Image (cartoon, rainbow, N blue to C red):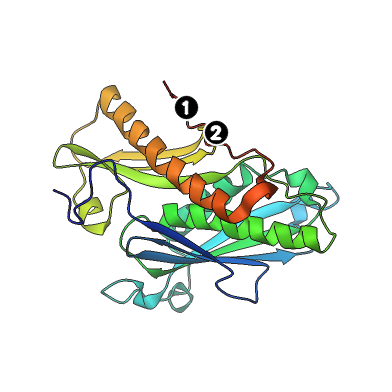
Amino acid sequence: MRVSGRGFDEPRPVRITPGFTSAPAGSVLIETGHTRVLCTASVEERVPQFLRGGESGWVTAEYSLLPGSTPVRTAREATRGKVTGRTSEIQRLIGRALRAVVDLKALGERTIWVDCDVIEADGGTRTAAVTGGFVAMCLAMQRLKREGLLTRVPVRDCVAATSVGIVRGIPLLDLEYEEDSQAEVDMNVVMTGHGEFVEIQGTAEGSPFSQDTLDELLRLARIGIAQLVAAQKAILGEDLQGGAETGTGNEE
């Protein structure tokens, strides 16, 4: 029996609250169980130097664990004077995941900054940041469309992420911290609404794992991501242009 009483293929309850803060162009609070991440999207009417003059936009992300998000206070990285390797890795993951589904040419020469701040961490913060960050980004694009700066929301599909792993020999979907901390295999999976993979981060913490184990973990990930995509579509509606149909593959 899992700590929360969930089934092995049952994700934590997910709530995505749009418009959680009013200042940025787009914002959501995403809650997956006790993990809570504030995702905001801000628009800057310029692009990095390497893209200037190329008639293409850019999407990038920043991520942070707020000091009170964990039982033992997490020091602000501004105080440390540098970004940790973990933070840098997660920021790159979020940025890659979002750019994978954005038509950067249609975005025009502007940058969307997606900031993901973890309010409470109970496992799966990076995957929640990808899932919530996508919605915040799309809300910012919807605002640009309303203001006449875009003719459409330039996304080709949804993108969402979840965690899977092996705990005490059992494949599990959507690990909370107590499970993640003792997992024999730990994996983060990022997929589009059509079931295409953007990124798979998988690690054996002890013994290597088999192809059959990998296949089962990916099957579980598809279950979780299908539910996350449905939650995204419920908020964003028709602006996804039908590109986010939940074709998570392997339907029989």
Nearest to the observer: residue 168 or residue 248: 248
Q: How many marks?
A: 2
Identify the residue at horizontal 48%, vertical 32% (top origin): 248
Identify the residue at horizontal 50%, vertical 45% (top origin): 229
CA–CA distance between discs 1 and 2? 7 Å
Q: Which mark is residue 83?
A: none
State the image coordinates of residue 112 (x, y, percent, origin top left).
68, 59
Q: Which mark is residue 194?
A: 2
In this rendering, the answer to whether 45 lies above or below 164 is below
Asked where in the image residue 157 lies, by quadrant, the reply is: top right
In this rendering, the answer to whether 186 lies above or below 68 is above
Kind of residue sitting beneath label 1: Gly
In this rendering, the answer to whether 22 lies above or below 15 is below
Contact, mark 1 vs mark 2 (Cβ under 8 Å): yes
Kind of residue sitting beneath label 2: His
Residue topped by disc 1 = 249
Secondary structure of the residue carrying tag 2 is: loop
Identify the residue at horizontal 65%, vertical 71% (top origin): 24
Report crowding for label 1: few under 14, some 14 to 19, many 20 or more residues within 10 A (C-alpha).
few
State the image coordinates of residue 149 (x, y, percent, origin top left).
84, 59
State the image coordinates of residue 169 (x, y, percent, origin top left).
15, 37
Residue 189 in sight from this viewpoint: no
Which image quarter holds the C terminus? top left
Q: Is residue 101 left or right of residue 51?
A: left
State the image coordinates of residue 20 (x, y, percent, origin top left).
55, 72
Asked where in the image residue 74 lies, by quadrant, the reply is: bottom left
Identify the residue at horizontal 48%, vertical 76% (top origin): 78
Q: Earlier in the sequence, mark 1 or mark 2?
A: 2
Report crowding for label 2: few under 14, some 14 to 19, many 20 or more residues within 10 A (C-alpha).
some
Q: Is residue 169 left or right of residue 216?
A: left
Nearest to the observer: residue 210 or residue 132: 132
Secondary structure of the residue carrying tag 1 is: loop
